[in-house]
Image (cartoon, rainbow, N blue to C red):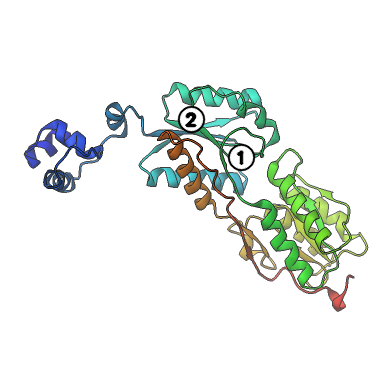
Amino acid sequence: MMTDVAKLAGVSHQTVSRVLNDSPQVRPETRERVLAAVAELGYRPNAMARGLVSRRSKVLGVVTFDTVLYGPASMMLGIERAARAAGYGVSIATIERVDRLGVLDAVNALADQGVDGVIIIAPQLYAEAALHDLPAQLVAIAVESGQDAGLPAASVDQIEGTRLVVQHLLDLGHRTVWHVTGPSGWYEARDRLEGWRRTLEAAGATIPPVIGGDWSARSGYDAGVTLAVEPGVSAVFTANDQMALGVLRAFAERGIRVPEDISVVGFDDIPEAAYLTPPLTTVRQDFDEVGRRSMRLLLQLLEGEIDVPEPPPVVPTLVVRASAGPPAGGSNR
């Protein structure tokens, strides 16, 4: 109890409150005495109680959607870790329908809880309309939204991540790279498609037809069945690792060796990627850094800073494993 801390430190209840809220109106020696009492008693101040003094709830709202996909789930975890490190709790609103009304309903529910601000994980085009129609007094930022979202945003450089992995295949000697794309309604799928196309164009390589996917291993398997009978395929870039898993299965069933016959690369570096057969070359996103940049941006806005610069996109890293190698015979099969 705060009263116990005050008694042990020999100060008033108000002085303890000032110390816990970093007030400059406390002498250094008094602050040290109060903090020593806090440590001795193991006192943990309640975030809501601090909020009554600071007019902040010390709780942030996060709008996300119901998914088991590795990327969005990891991004949510990164944001939660960053919030905890900054002394904030997190209230999560999961939307069942990814559209304007679904997002607005979730945002309004969080606003009714009195959260200090809201982070909206909005990687789908269908959610963008809601970002232009948020409550006027709400402090909000977006994560993985489009450039026209109308909100400050934190993101991963999907185009650069794609360039890294596609260029790796070209540097191995492949004359072109086929692509299994994610669903068209996702910004990440769109940007990875654009990065693939740009990289091939910059290399003067032929751009093959796109094979559609929906992020699932099943759609990757179906794409692998198609690619297995397509002449001239020596390298495949799938827009996420789950689809790469499906491609690998389809190739294995048809006697196509990876990487001896066809190289396969993915994106995300799921925990299982290193244990596939063969281990998967892929792109790793730093979701903890996305969380930190999101929190830094939101806290700057909460402090009333004006013209806060949007953080630069987090640059992913290439993870080279055994699923990619030179084309058979030094050229496309």
Above or below 94: residue 228: below
Residue at the outermost right position? 231
Residue wearing tag 2 = 139
Marks 2 and 1, how far apart in space?
Answer: 25 Å
Disc 2, disc 1: CB below 8 Å? no
Q: 82 or 181, which is in the foreground?
A: 82
Looking at the image, which residue is at 27% across and 28% down?
53
What amino acid is labelled 1 in the image?
A: Thr
Which element carries disc 1, helix, strand or loop? loop
Which element carries disc 2, helix, strand or loop? loop
Q: 252 or 229, which is in the foreground?
A: 229
How far across and down, in percent of the image, does residue 179 sit? 80, 55
Above or below 219: residue 88: above
Is any atom of residue 78 visible in this view?
Answer: no
Q: 152 or 185, which is in the foreground?
A: 152
How far across and down, in percent of the image, does residue 300 sit? 44, 39
Q: 302 left or right of 74? A: left
Residue wearing tag 1 = 67
Looking at the image, which residue is at 63% across and 55% down?
268
